[in-house]
Image (cartoon, coloured by chain):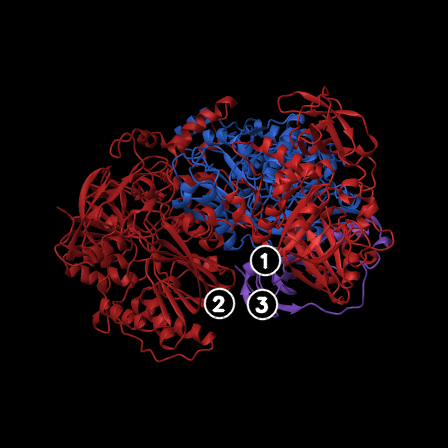
Chain colours: A blue, B purple, C red
Amino acid sequence: MKEYSAFSLLRHAASHNRNWRRAWRSPEPRRRYDVIIVGGGGHGLATAYYLAKEHGVRNIAVLEKDWIGGGNTGRNTTIVRSNYLCPESSLLYEKSLKLWEGLSQDLNYNVMFSQRGVYNLGHSLQDMRDIERRVSANRLNGIDAEVVTVAQIKKAIPLINTSPTARYPILGASLQRRAGVARHDAVAWGFARAADARGVDIIEQCRVTGVNRDGGKVTGVETTRGTIHSDKIGIVVAGNASVLAAMAGMRLPIQSHPLQAFVSEPLKRVLDTVVMSGAVHGYISQSDKGDLVIGAGIDAYTGYGQRGSFQTIEHTMAAIIQLFPTFSRVRMLRMWGGIVDICPDACPIIGKTSVDGLYFNCGWGTGGFKATPGSGWTFAHTIAKDEPHELNAPFSLERFISGALIDEHGAAAVAH
Amino acid sequence: MFLIQCPWCGERAETEFSYGGEAGIVRPLEPDALSDAEWADYLFNRTNLRGAYKELWNHAQGCRRWFGVERDTVTYKIEGSYELPSGRAGKGA
Amino acid sequence: MQPNRLKQGGRIDRSRALSFRFNGKSYEGYTGDTLASALLANGVSLVSRSFKLHRPRGIVGAGAEEPNAILQIGRGASTLPTQRATQVELYDGLEARSTKGWPSLRFDIAAFNDLVSPLLAAGFYYKTFMRPQALWPWYERFIRAAAGFGLAPREPDPDRYEHRNAHCDVLIAGAGPAGLIAALVAARSGARVIIADEQNEFGGSLLSASQTIDAEPATAWIEATTAELDALDNVTMLTRSTVFGYYDHNFVAIVERCTDHIGEDVAGVRQRLWRVRAKQVVLAQGAFERPLVFCNNDRPGVMLASAVSCYIHRYAVCPGKRAVVFTNNDSAYRTAIDLRAAGASVVIIDSRAEGAGALADAARADGITMLPGHIVTDVSGRRHVSGVRVAQWNGDVTSTVQNTINIDCDLVAVSGGWSPAVHLHSQSGGKNAWSDDLHCFVPAEYAQANVSAGAGNGKWSLQDCLQDGLDAGIEVIARCGIEAADVTLPLAVEVASRPLEPLWRVPAATDPDRCPKQFVDFQIDTSVADIRLAVREGYRNVEHVKRYTALGFGTDQGKLGNINGMAILAECLGEDIASVGTTAFRPAYTPVTFGVGAAENVGDLFEPVRKTAIHASHEAAGAPFEVVGQWHRPWYFPQGDEDLHTSVARECLATRKSVGMMDASTLGKIDARGPDVVEFLRRIYTHDVGKMKVGRCAYGIMLGEDGMVMDDGVIARVAERQFYLTTTTGGAAPVLAWLERWLQTEWPELEVYLTSLTEHYATIVVAGPNSRRVLQDIGCNIDLERDSFAFMSVRDAELAGIAVTLFRVSFSGELAFEINIDSRNALKMWQLVADAGAKFDITPYGTETMHVLRAEKGFVIVGQDTDGSVTPVDLRLQWLLSKDKDFLGKRSLSRTDCVRSDRKQLVGLLSEDGKTVLPEGTQLVDDPGAAIPVPMCGHVTSSYYSACLGRPIAMALVATGHSRRDEIIFASLADGSAVPVRIVSPVFYDPEGERQND
């Protein structure tokens, strides 16, 4: 892999940018791989990358039905944080955050991880109790977190409405300073390029149509580009987990919903951090390009249409105006939707299944993007060792049978 | 915003309704006879179909009746609504 | 004064001059102008700078496709960011400025970027700014400082917005010839019609041309048609109204701009969001002209040919005196003729080999020079075009060419053909298909009840548009089951056109990677070389190319450049355009103000505030309110300048010592009755409701099917087959829905009737040793003494002659009565209680005191002391779990995780120092010195200073807590300190319950 650097930009500019190499190859699928990863989103590409990098697996394919990074990876509001409530989730997300912190350098691809801080606002006494509980737990887990006052919020975010007579007045917030946002497409492309450099075959336009089993063992997949054999198959297809599970003869504790987002026209710098509010249901940041990037709530119904209902957007606009009355005159440029797979406890499933060699990584709900490197890292471990890493062990399918759910509803009352 | 046919009130906007998820999930008559895995299957697992899906809706801001809807979860096209069966043989909780 | 304004013509009102300012300088325009036409009239050419390279930019288009003239309009609180000058109607006093360019628009230091543009090629930022890692925030500051167009207002929006719902048979988007005639046939047939157009008047493209209909000027036909529509009361006509979103089930969103054209600080609704449910939709939004992609094609003075015609016809503005028209199709010949008529000299450069046909003949007859088989390869001039370089061309797109001619000019009008505005069709779920004849995407498969018509359907000639619109109108009303009225197809005289010959990338003197920039997306500075680079680097899917080069991510969302970009991509890939595929269009068609999305739901109306029937009294008493869901509940009742803690301490002591009163009206209340109500409630609640006697109350909990505590409350059996259930405040609506759902979906054989009484009844709690005497003093018609009205009983009674239901239940641990009373009598009763209690110093208390009193007794609050992962056993409520029957959630309690002995369990906590009030939420640890991650054994759920006990108390969920009585653990505080706390029983006060039983 040729290095990307300011120097290489200069050198290539001198030759009219005509000698840049492909970021990743476009190989024909081979008949057999040591590991097949189904799903070329950020999580799948990260899994392949860490399988190659951390576990020395050489013969890996990533199968993508369409184009890489085209699902939720390229549709989310790019918030990265690790200040979750339960120790299980916060440790998993913290692993991810630590990987984020060196990701551009590790991948030699600038994913523009911008640690500008995330404020989770509290609007009621119960919100503040929950914030205190979460911050207290985060600190004991070694995760930076603090409870901030209304005055501190106002200082950091001058345009926010801190009036005590607001319909849902702001009483305080939690702040994670190391949290922030990243450039979503770059994450997929950076992992793809780095994985490709380690020999991973990234095969786009290759839809999996069946999962082949020999008794209790997985043997390969049927695809639109033929049968591909492998004894280990990792499925990481946010938005379609239940569809792939059905191919493997399983049902999952997942329901898929539309989750919408929208951006404004590009504005001059006006918001330097990320603001999230569960009570009024809105979250907002400003991209480096200047767009306000705004996340809406989940549409209630099951939906694979990558779009939701307009009243959800109306409500989110109202929520944003609650928080930032001055944004009322700003305009929405574009809205879109993704498909979020939600587990009953709002936590993911990363682990083995009842079928040997078949692994699932799904159910990230609204929290998938921030987990991309950590998800890939733990899933790679699980596939390579055929057993979960201690970080993802609690996130097994088994928990739905034993009842050991990880209740993140408190921390994830609003989509994020 | 969907236009949903309430079997009792007619076509109404989606905002009048609340969603109830997959239809046809029957509570086991004898929960104690089930293994933990079987109970979990009832409790949590869903077909979550991509395509034609039978689901429950409640006309929460109207007659408050629950009813079934067949809807395509990709195109969101609604095939129709139907009343739920009533007066089935007694089942315990 | 206005150098480019023509002496006559146009749809402006010359009698009404308007003054406006641009970048601080004053200009004059006319009513009917847009900001863009007024700027052009005044010869203002440079209006902004591009996003990345800061190249000087001028006005290109005349509508929603405009990429460059993105300006800040207005001042102060009513300023508007990122407005397209082509869509801003001029008003007197309008103030506009460009937000790009420093120190000035003319001399912009950041234009340096253009000089080093090879360094700033597509995706350059992914390849650098990585080392040293610590410097990224610094790099990012510079990136952010350079980014963005508009300035968000710094003050709250002074304007008002509203929503309006509407239903119709036929909604027509676009009031050009196709839309108007479709509306005419639908309206005459009696259908309910809504027709919306984004312009200030109906007519569409006809307003920008000199065509005739039925041998009259087209404008006469528009006037007659709109007059007829206007006279019909089944038609709603919306001007300045953009159909921006086409959602599922024919739900269509329109934003109507009511006052923006008048000015700022105008009374009334600024914008109105129409939420329309249409049986049928006709999409007739017309088409966009495509520019041609040649070197320096972004220089100010290079404009779309159709825009030039529009400015001439509609605004009487001729943007140049010496014009070059560069085209690959016949439509720009009309522009050439228009320019000639406006007095400009004109040269037509046509990339097609022959300059033949009727329009060419007409052009020649007008004295226009024609150069068929030629192309414009480059432009000279920096802040304004000063000339073009022209080369002869043989039609080979892969070749380079020799420039042979230089032509001086001050205007280049370009046309690369037309693309139907298929945005709404695409939003509706419809598919588009590439037409090899028309060289554009046209609507193909329909997904909803809609039809495309006119130029938006690939019909270019006026006659075809009228025919297509008429057909569409007839089609949709037939689908509505309405018989079509008679409409005669008007006749438009057409000059035969020669077909377009595609020219997606104009060859240059050098190859496309070396030649001066050939812009595809102007605003965002995406060039041909960028697309080629993306493909070279493996970003080959159209979505990857768009995202890597930012093509289409400007505020025009690719209306100007996307099709050219896709065609150039197809060329790079060696594929045809159809296989490159189109990308899905998302709402909004043009940007929509957040304010109109929110409309009335702002400020206090964001969500309704629910107030109890006694609210006014609390307000008069000066109580601060706690926000609990939608409710405002009195938090405490300060006297004088008391703070929360002194007030609460006083309220608690007064209640325990004598008597207190509180408004508990927000509790959920449900009447459940019917022949099968006992069986039903046995399944819902964990204990056996069937064993309750009439007139008795019980504490009950209900579980989710996962076995976790969902809600709690009092169950009163008021008659053999009638129960009165209370829920938590937050649980009122969800519990009712939960009960209804089971009843209707799972147990329809049970005959039970549920009625919410939450708003119907108010609840006044009178608690404390003197509570009975207060009620007696009010005058009660039943015996309230212990023997006849025991603890956990319920009775209908009269207080001061007013009917009430009395509950002898207690959430405070004191002797207490809960008075349930019709809401209309509640305020009166509140006063009666207060008056009767005066001699006992009765003390009103709020939610905070209620919390303290119940915590002293160890009563949990579901949602505070539980969080969705707490079983009844964890709360030591196993005595409430019936062994004799099934109930919802029961099976889950025997799962392996639910029977673990080390689950988190409810306990009481006392800080060892007797002073520290633990912050609620604080995590608890066994070993505060443990290494990170420190294992946590629980957390504080409730914590207060108990004035009654003279010390702080707390409740907590602690692992294995029930068997750890008297152990010391530690509360880990934010400052890093660890407070030793002792695990105790959560019942701190009157453990035997003697007081409440009194």
Quarter of the figure that contains the C terminus of chain B: bottom right
Q: Chain of mark 3?
A: B
Residue C288, percent from left and from top: 34, 55
Q: Nearer the viewer, mark 1 or mark 3?
A: 3
Residue topped by disc 3: B5
Residue topped by disc 2: C449
Element on which disc 2 rests: loop
Residue topped by disc 1: B74
Q: Are marks 1 and 3 in contact (CB under 8 Å)?
A: no
The foreground one among C333 and C419 is C419
The foreground one among C326 and C707 is C707
Q: Residue at 80% of width from left, 68% of height from top?
A: B89
Residue C704, percent from left and from top: 73, 50
Marks 3/2: CA–CA distance: 17 Å
Identify which amino acid the numbered label 1 is placed on. Answer: Val
Q: Residue at 48% of width from left, 60% of height from top?
A: C428
Q: Chain of mark 2?
A: C
Disc on the earlier residue, 1 or 3: 3
Residue C30, percent from left and from top: 19, 52
Marks 1/3: CA–CA distance: 19 Å
Whether residue A343 is visible to the viewer of this picture, yes or no, is no
Q: In the figure, C518 relative to C757: above or below? A: above
**Quadrant hosting residue C761:** bottom right
Identify which amino acid the numbered label 2 is placed on. Answer: Ala
Few, some or many C-alpha atoms within 10 Å of disc 3 (few <14, some 14-19, many ≥20)?
many
Q: In the figure, C292 relative to C681: above or below? A: above
Residue C544, percent from left and from top: 50, 43
Few, some or many C-alpha atoms within 10 Å of disc 2 (few <14, some 14-19, many ≥20)?
some
Element on which disc 3 rests: strand
Element on which disc 1 rests: loop
Identify which amino acid the numbered label 3 is placed on. Answer: Gln
The foreground one among C232 and C581 is C232
